[in-house]
């Protein structure tokens, strides 16, 4: 499904599974945009505002550490959209309106992939939340695609322990990856697919080349 929501020409999102290299790649994009003289705001999801970061903690902290009950898939979906509604209004729209570029480490595509693909929630419900609570799309989305075992190994080398999502099983991450790939294939105008299994300098070079092309043409394709 390709949304008809407006695509903002200064809004870039990075998407992909655990350990794909999103957070690592973001600095290369920032440097590229700054070289062109642009103001750049880096942000992330879930989170990006003080309130939304508190929601992030609810979503990512292992269940047993917060309360003696599991977080339901439906509550997880509504929490990530509550955080996103706040993030869009408090941070993303004001920055775009003053002329800055915004780079978000994850955005709504992650909800389609994790809560839709991973948890199996109804995609039409997600699209309705996107339309009502978010109301815009990035102009460019870089999907960092990597084998799930490779991503897992990278993420586990970095963290003290897995968060609530990272603790999911391989079949969950397989569905997440497939959902991301399907979204990218359905909307090649917005998405650039990056082979994130390559060495980090090559991933950075590919990401920067996409951003340069997007800046030059106003589109990925
Ligand atoms: N292309 C690469 N090759 C090898 N290692 C990489 C590569 N890109 C990133 N890494 C390393 O893998 C780890 C995970 O990278 P990073 O934190 O950027 O992933 P992420 O996509 O942001 O993960 P998460 O979804 O968990 O936030 C880091 O230790 C990083 O240094
Ligand atoms: Mg990250």
Image: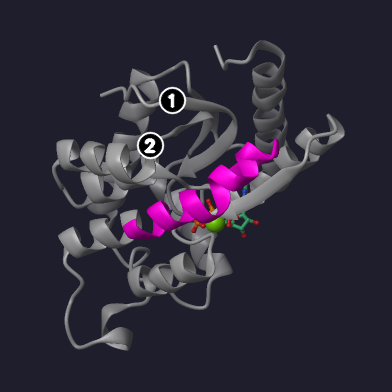
Quadrant, the C terminus = top right
The x, y position of residue 216, in whole percent, is 72, 14
Left or right of 151? Residue 72 is: left
- Compared with 166, 37 (above or below) is above
Q: Nearer the viewer, residue 159 or 62?
A: 62
Which SS class for mark 1?
A: loop
Q: Is residue 104 visible?
A: no
Q: Residue beneath label 2, please?
A: 135
Return the mark for residue 21: none
Which SS class for mark 2?
A: loop
The x, y position of residue 122, in whole percent, is 13, 42
| Majority secondary structure in the magenta region | helix
Indicate the quadrant where residue 12 lies. Answer: top right
Q: Is residue 43 visible?
A: yes
Q: Would the CB of label 1 be found within 8 Å of ligand 2?
A: no
Q: Kindly check if marks 1 and 2 are in contact, taking CB atoms under 8 A apart as contact.
A: yes
- Which of the four quarters of the rendered structure image does ligand 2 lie in? bottom right
At x 39% / y 60%, what residue is drawn? Answer: 83
Q: Residue beneath label 1, please?
A: 6
Mark closest to the chain's N terminus, 1 or 2: 1
Q: Nearer the viewer, residue 43 or 69?
A: 43
Q: Nearer the viewer, residue 179 or 211?
A: 211
Quadrant, the N terminus = top left
Marks 1 and 2, how far apart at CA: 7 Å
Q: Nearer the viewer, residue 99 or 175?
A: 99
**Magenta highlight range:** 82-104
């Amino acid at each position: 499904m390709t949304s008809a929501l407006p695509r903002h020409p200064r809004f870039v999102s990075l998407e992909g599974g655990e350990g794909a290299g999103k957070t690592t790649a973001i600095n290369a994009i920032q440097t590229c945009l700054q070289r062109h003289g642009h103001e750049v705001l880096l942000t992330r999801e879930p989170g990006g505002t003080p309130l939304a970061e508190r929601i992030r903690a609810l979503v990512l902290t292992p269940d047993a550490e917060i309360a003696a009950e599991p977080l339901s898939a439906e509550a997880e979906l509504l929490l990530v959209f509550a955080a996103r509604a706040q993030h869009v209004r408090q941070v993303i729209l004001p920055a775009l309106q003053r002329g800055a570029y915004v780079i978000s480490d994850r955005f709504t595509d992650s909800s389609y992939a994790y809560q839709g693909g991973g948890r199996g929630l109804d995609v039409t419900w997600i699209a309705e939340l996107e339309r009502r609570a978010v109301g815009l799309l990035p102009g460019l989305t870089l999907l960092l695609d990597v084998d799930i075992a490779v991503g897992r190994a990278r993420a586990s080398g970095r963290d003290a322990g897995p968060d609530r999502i990272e603790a999911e099983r391989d079949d969950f991450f397989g569905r997440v990856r497939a959902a991301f790939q399907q979204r990218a294939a359905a909307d090649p105008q917005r998405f650039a697919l990056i082979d994130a299994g390559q060495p980090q300098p090559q991933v950075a070079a590919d990401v920067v080349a996409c951003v340069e092309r997007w800046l030059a043409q106003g589109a990925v394709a």
